Image (cartoon, rainbow, N blue to C red):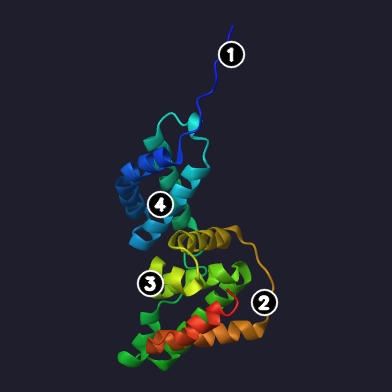
Amino acid sequence: MTTPQAPPPAEPDAALSVFLAQRPQLIRTARRITGNATEADDVVQETWLRWQRADRTKVVNAAAFLTSTTTNLARNVVRSARYRHEAPLLLPGAVRATTETGQDPTWYADRTADAEEALALLLTRLTPGQLAAYVLRRGFDYAYADLASLLGTSVANSRQLVSRAQARLRSGQAQAVPAVVGRRLSAAFVGASRTGDLRELETVLTATA
């Protein structure tokens, strides 16, 4: 008796076609859960990476697999320490508001301290490339194409850097970082936030990326 043979793995083009057909719905699902378009985009990118790694010969329903993966990843983002603001990344507008609206200087000092604390956490958990991609994407809404150009990589790799940074932040892995590095990054970040001139921040972030 001839032993039944397992079907061959799906071709990459076929896997991509299946994913692209589901992507609009996945984006809607991720955005509904996270409430954030950028978060949703990153969640779906991670879903694509997992779909590539999956043994698709064992997936009975591709749409259900992709939807379930996206839902779980989005929920993880919502539960993550960064999302709950245990490690917040101060957005540029928060710092600029101090000078533009006459905000209490004490408030500004507090927000600057928040930024320094968050950046210190990022420094201890992310690789240089991940740090650069994550700070510029999350803090200043850089397009992935701009990140790719700045970091000398592809758009796909720039997306992966941000996605892996998020995963690494959730993992809690840490490494020692010289204090002077943290001070220089914090000064560049706050300066960029206040003035809108990101050249020094880019220089600091790409020095070791």
Task: Name the residue beneath numbered marker 1.
Answer: 3
Q: Disc 1 versus disc 3: distance between alpha carbons?
A: 55 Å
Relative to 59, does residue 2 appear above or below in the rendering? above
Q: Where the C terminus falls, by quadrant? A: bottom right
Q: Marks 1 and 2: which is nearer the front? A: 1
Task: Name the residue beneath numbered marker 2.
Answer: 177
> Mark 1 vs mark 4: which is more N-terminal?
1
Task: Name the residue beneath numbered marker 3.
Answer: 141
- The residue lying at 42 percent from left, 93 percent from top is 105
> Mark 2 vs mark 3: which is more N-terminal?
3
**Helix or strand or loop: what does disc 2 sit on?**
loop
* Three-letter code, disc 3: Asp
> Mark 1 vs mark 2: which is more N-terminal?
1
Side of 153 relative to 64 (left or right):
right
* Three-letter code, disc 1: Thr
User: Camera-side residue: 199 or 176?
Assistant: 199
- Where is residue 52? Give x, y as percent: 49, 44
> Mark 1 vs mark 3: which is more N-terminal?
1
**Helix or strand or loop: what does disc 1 sit on?**
loop
User: Label 2: how many residues lie within 10 Å, few (<14), some (14-19) or many (20+)?
Assistant: few
- The residue lying at 50 percent from left, 25 percent from top is 7
Q: Disc 2 versus disc 3: distance between alpha carbons?
A: 26 Å
Q: Disc 1 versus disc 4: distance between alpha carbons?
A: 38 Å
- The residue lying at 40 percent from left, 31 percent from top is 61
Q: Disc 2 versus disc 4: distance between alpha carbons?
A: 32 Å
Q: Are marks 1 and 4 in contact (CB under 8 Å)?
A: no
* Three-letter code, disc 4: Val
> Mark 2 vs mark 4: which is more N-terminal?
4
Task: Name the residue beneath numbered marker 4.
Answer: 44
